[in-house]
Amino acid sequence: SAVISQKPSRDICQRGTSLTIQCQVDSQVTMMFWYRQQPGQSLTLIATANQGSEATYESGFVIDKFPISRPNLTFSTLTVSNMSPEDSSIYLCSVSSTPLGSPFYGYTFGSGTRLTVV
Amino acid sequence: GQNIDQPTEMTATEGAIVQINCTYQTSGFNGLFWYQQHAGEAPTFLSYNVLDGLEEKGRFSSFLSRSKGYSYLLLKELQMKDSASYLCAALPDSNYQLIWGAGTKLIIKP
């Protein structure tokens, strides 16, 4: 299955600033997903990042707040813009564990970015 | 709408067996996943069921009934390291976006 390197693992940021989170995958994948997980809660999908097109955002999330880049099939970034304490959360990227062109078989997650906004 | 229900918290004893249930209602169905998540860590894949029946992987087994919209995760010979949250997720259709349950926090006592 795919292996994801996610950076940074954690950060403490000042309100009003922006943080860019990176995910690098060791194989080409069609879709990458960005999630937010608040403490003690389940995963909330922010957006789906497709290579060569704009990301698809879920209800409640907008591109101005969470711009996403997907320059190729192995890399994506999520930026949390103009941060406020309410953005404090764990952010996770995820990909289908299936190498491009193979039958589907599950999802892999990055190790997560623990963000604290002060 | 699309919905997944699972218990919020369960407690079990080391060495025992526990069953975590999950019911789902989705517009379509392409499989049911179970993930384990330790506190402060990312979820890790446990199982994927797309056909009815029981799939066993060592101490962990997962069951699916598509007609009932029901799945369970069975953990045997519980160990303290099994204390974690267990997330149930369904794949409604082929766009690969999962619907997640809120997770079941499993507490293992000596």
Image (tube, rainbow, N blue to C red):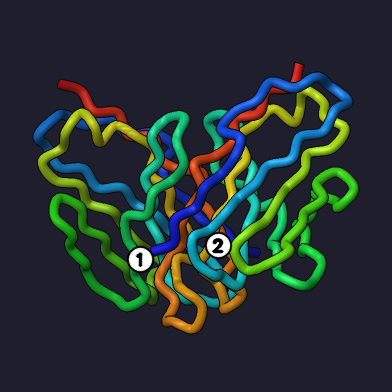
The verdict on a common chain for dots 1 and 2 is yes
Instruction: Name the amino acid, label 2.
Output: Leu
> What residue is rendered at 51% in x and 56% in y?
B4
Camera-nearest residue between A85 and B69: A85
Q: Which residue is mark 2?
A: B98
Q: Secondary structure at mark 2?
A: loop
Q: Which mark is residue B88?
A: none
Q: Are marks 1 and 2 in contact (CB under 8 Å)?
A: no
Residue type at mark 1 is Tyr
Q: Residue A57, image x and y in percent?
A: 78, 58
Q: Chain of mark 2?
A: B
- Position of the C terminus of chain B by quadrant: top left
The residue carrying pointer 2 sits among few (fewer than 14), some (14 to 19) or many (20 or more) residues within 10 Å by Cα, namely many
Image quadrant in which the N terminus of chain B is located: bottom right
Which of A76/A80 is in front?
A76
Q: Name above or below for residue B81 compared with residue A64.
A: above
Query: Which residue lies under the disc numbered 1?
Result: B48
Left or right of B7 in this view: A18: right
Q: Residue, x 38% and y 74% (percent of image)?
A: B66
Image point 14% across, 30% down: which residue?
A: B14
**Frontmost residue, B10 versus A108:** A108
Q: Residue placed at 61% from the left, 35% from the top? A: A8
Residue A31 sits in which quadrant? bottom right
Residue A106 place in picture, x, y as percent: 43, 66
Place of residue A33 in the rendered image (x, y in percent of width and height, measured from the top left): 62, 58
Query: What element does badge 1 sit on?
Result: strand
Distance in Å between CA atoms under marks 1 and 2: 12 Å
State the image coordinates of residue A91 (x, y, percent, origin top left).
62, 40
Lateral position of residue B41 relative to residue A87, left or right: left
Quadrant hosting residue B31: bottom left
Q: Compared with residue B5, is residue A117 higher up or lower down, i.e. above or below?
A: above
